[in-house]
Image: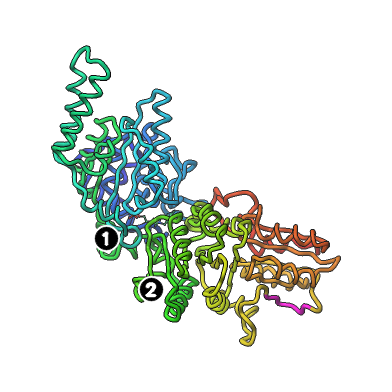
Amino acid sequence: MSYEILDTVNSPEDIKALDGKKIEPLCAEIREFLVEKVSATGGHLASNLGVVELSVALHRVFDTPTDHIIFDVGHQAYVHKLLTGRRDMFDVLRKPGGLSGFTVMRESEHDAFGAGHSSTSISAALGYAEADRLAGKDNYTVAVIGDGAYTGGMVHEAINNCHPDLPLIIVINENGMSISTNKGAFASYLSRVRVSKGYIRAKKRTGSFLEKIPLLGKPVKSLLTACKNLAVKLLFRPNYFEELGFYYIGPIDGNDYEKVELALKQAKELKKCVFVHIKTKKGKGCTVAEQSPEVYHSVANSKVDKPTYHEVFAEKLVSLAGEDKSVVAITPAMGIGTGLDKFEEKYPDRYFDVGIAEEHALTFSAGLCAGGLKPYAAIYSTFLQRGYDNIIHDIALQNLPVRFIIDRAGLAPSDGATHHGIFDVAFLSHTPGVEIISPVSYRSLDRFLELSVDTDHPLAIRYPNTYEDDAVREQFFSDETQDFARSCKVDFDISNPPSRIFVTYGSIVSRVLTAKRMLEEKGVSVGIVLVERIKPFDDTLDLLKTIVGQDTQIVYVEEGIKNGGAGMITRSRLYEMGVTPHNFKVVAIDDNFVIPDTLTDIYDYAGLSPEKLINHFEL
Ligand SMILES: Cc1ncc(C[n+]2csc(CCOP(=O)(O)OP(=O)(O)O)c2C)c(N)n1
């Protein structure tokens, strides 16, 4: 499609040169462009539709890359990308090797900081501002953060560390939503906060008045400043931000272009740390997205009509909660993504959406546990990384039976490197006392969940963002009489094992099964050991001890990081036990973040496609 104004805007210089009268129609065109492109590729539609005016204003008021604009999470930076020369790449938005759906430093000099995980922008912006101060540069740094991301603890750590005199502008974009409705005391305060009229003027006047008095000694000046500040406070009743010593401008209608630009210009002029509070409509300009911003927060480009692992989990948890009143569910702002919104409907009292606060979610779960409840904390694999120490220090060390429900385990082709769930097995493997289960069928998920209710130690159940694979189910789970909670399943006769064996866990088993069939077509027979209870490692080791001979070749395939992963641990323990197969290769993600720079199949890029997997056996 062609666009009258947008077609003339390809850089921040173009947007600055544009006649002011054309801004509003430009914003309308940008919205059309976003709907057109994101409908085809999938992506964070509603969040981006809300920040069109803000993004345009930022690029008219500030000069990137000299000034630094840092978008929190980075999921709402599409307009920023569009205005900084990346329009041609929108057809490959969220494709591996294409245009990232988040900000990425190596993608553009205009992306001041890479993101994907929430609540980092103010810390990073503060770092930039301090670096500029020390270098004697008078650049501006702007952090753009949503009210959802503002619930994350790092934000408050960063603000505690901010200096009022730094030229740091923090734009808070309040739209009342995280992915679902924003929850919590601060979110609620934000919707009520008002500027104390006249406060900025009075505060500025105090400073300039004192500067004009000659020969004023330092102690006298400090005393007078303190007295004046107190008087200003008593008079104007400053809000939270002002109480902390910062300037506050707002709340501004963030979808009114002129008001946003004016607020940013005022903030720039102050040359201090300023909070600019805007209110926007998530999904603005697209009726369905405005009506259901949680549905259009992120849209998929296709949907298969089958239940997903997380839906099966949520349904089961609701049923378990019906039988056991001590079952409670915790989510850090991912009620819809994890399926726990169903739990909330049925048991609102036992459902805790704690905001985007993974560390808190975990330690809070530990507290619930210590208090006698049975917490299920559902967290995406990639976001669980935030809670590494909470798992070690607050849960494992005290052997509290928190159940971690780890969603989106494995590679995340569309979201990319920030969202790959490839570290959880490695870091939970080295955390003492944590059991790790990786069901690859709905039957085993169901059974392991049933057993989890009575666990007496920390337990992780991990599964991917996909559906049960029919071929895998038929191969490993068709026998109704078997116990679906066994640690390992095999597709060969244990008393007569093949000499080539794949060992694997998680959804990569689908590709391993294809690789096995490809080898069989070539006349090479291969067996698969499918591990569902990864840790303790004993059951897998006992099985391998039984089936491994001097001529056995083992290829351990892992959709996770190789160093410290289950494959390496299994290999080293097996050798320690004196079991020495002919060969034991670990095929996993080898010391990289899986970031292709050309369009590609991400599994092939990671060496995990069936075509690559078949090359690891000696024939
Ligand atoms: C650490 C972490 N946890 C969870 C998420 C998932 N997530 C992505 S965007 C988002 C909501 C952000 O809300 P807000 O900051 O208000 O932005 P909006 O989309 O409403 O503009 C969440 C929870 C994340 N990116 N990072």
Which residue is tagged 1? Answer: 286
Assign ligand 1 to one image quadrant: bottom left
Position of the C terminus by quadrant: bottom right
Residue, far right: 550
- Residue 143 lies, in percent from the top left, at 35, 41
* Whether residue 251 is situated above or below residue 134 in the rendered picture: below
Residue, far bottom: 481
- Mark 1 neighbour density, 10 Å: few (under 14) some (14–19) many (20 or more): some
**Secondary structure that dominates the magenta span:** loop
* Whether residue 271 is situated above or below residue 346 in the rendered picture: above
- Which residue type carries mark 2? Lys
- Residue 103 lies, in percent from the top left, at 43, 46
Start-end of magenta stretch: 489-494
Position of the N terminus by quadrant: bottom left
Residue, far front: 371
* Whether residue 260 is situated above or below residue 391 in the rendered picture: above
Which residue is tagged 2? Answer: 342
Q: Is residue 490 magenta?
A: yes
